[in-house]
Amino acid sequence: MTTRQGGKGTPPFYSFNMASYTGDDETIVYENRKLLASDISFPLSQWRGATQVHGRRLMKVTSDQGSDDRLGLKMIGEADGLYTTEKNILLVSFYADCVPLFIYVPSRELIGLLHAGWKGTAEQIGPKSIAILRKEERIDPSEVHVVIGPAISHKVYEVDDTVIQKMKAILPPGARAPWTKTRDSHYLLDLKEMNRLLFLSSGVKKENMAVSQYCTYSEKETFFSYRRDQGHTGRMMTFIGWKDC
């Protein structure tokens, strides 16, 4: 995952905004993407992304898919989940508080990337994606490795009762609720933990999961935050790919 450091930009997008839809100068976004492409030796022509709509759709990505977004990234439609079994494809998505979920199945050389805000979490993008991989790719959930990346933490993520009711509807039986009440109809929600519990319920092993402790809201010098910056901010980019060395 990128940070807000090391690139180019002007306030409030300084200095490494990777997303073109934020209102930032597209020329600067393109320069930042080229900087990263050079750093990781993954040319922009191999990047694949999707329009994120806070849903649960998972799409399989192949090298012949995508139309250029004018800034080097090839887009393949609307989806919040991408996966591939091909090398030399870089899956990318964009964040400024939502939870990035990285998927890796070493036995099948399969990788995936899921975008989980509270809506995507409520739609169970994690377990639904595992179910699709099980059906379409014959993946055993016990083989799946997951990394839950930097996102807004439970210490500062306050939500209302509408959100919590949706979380209650999908909380696995016997699981401890990852939220605490702060005042009437308001709660602090741990979205990372909610997604971890949902993956566990889908058959992913506890020992095959890692959870980042970084908070995008609290660590202002490192991360953009949609909530902290009241929507006027840049985006970090998560990425995962197999490189044919």
Image (cartoon, helix red, strand yellow):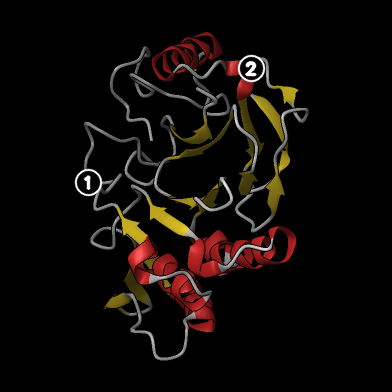
Q: In this view, does 93 lie above or below 64?
A: below
* Disc with the residue nearer the chain's start (1 vs 2): 2
- What is the three-letter code of the residue carrying label 2? Ser
Q: How crowded is mark 1: few (under 14 residues within 10 Å), some or many (20 or more)?
A: some
What is the x, y in percent for residue 9? 38, 14
Q: For the point 48% across and 82% down, which residue is it?
A: 168
Q: In this view, does 236 lie above or below 188?
A: above
Gap between marks 1 and 2, in whole Å?
34 Å
What is the x, y in percent for residue 202? 53, 74
Q: Which SS class for mark 1?
A: loop
The answer to whether 81 appears left or right of 105 in the picture is right
What is the x, y in percent for residue 106? 50, 50
What is the x, y in percent for residue 92? 54, 34
- If the image is split into quadrants, where does the N terminus sit? top left
Q: For the point 69% across and 30% down, which residue is it?
A: 75
Q: For the point 35% across and 35% down, which residue is it?
A: 224
Residue farthest to the bottom?
Answer: 174
According to the picture, the residue beneath numbered tag 1 turns out to be 218
Q: Looking at the rendered structure, which numbered label has been put on residue 45?
A: 2
In depth, the one of 82 and 106 nearer the eye is: 106
Q: In this view, does 11 lie above or below 203?
A: above
- What is the three-letter code of the residue carrying label 1? Ser
Q: For the point 71% across and 46% down, which residue is it?
A: 60
Q: Residues within 10 Å of mark 2 (few under 14, many from 20)?
A: some
Cβ–Cβ below 8 Å for labels 1 and 2? no
Q: Which SS class for mark 2?
A: helix
In depth, the one of 130 and 106 nearer the eye is: 106
Q: Looking at the rendered structure, which numbered label has been put on residue 101?
A: none
Please name which of the two marks, 1 or 2, marks the residue nearer to the observer.
Answer: 2
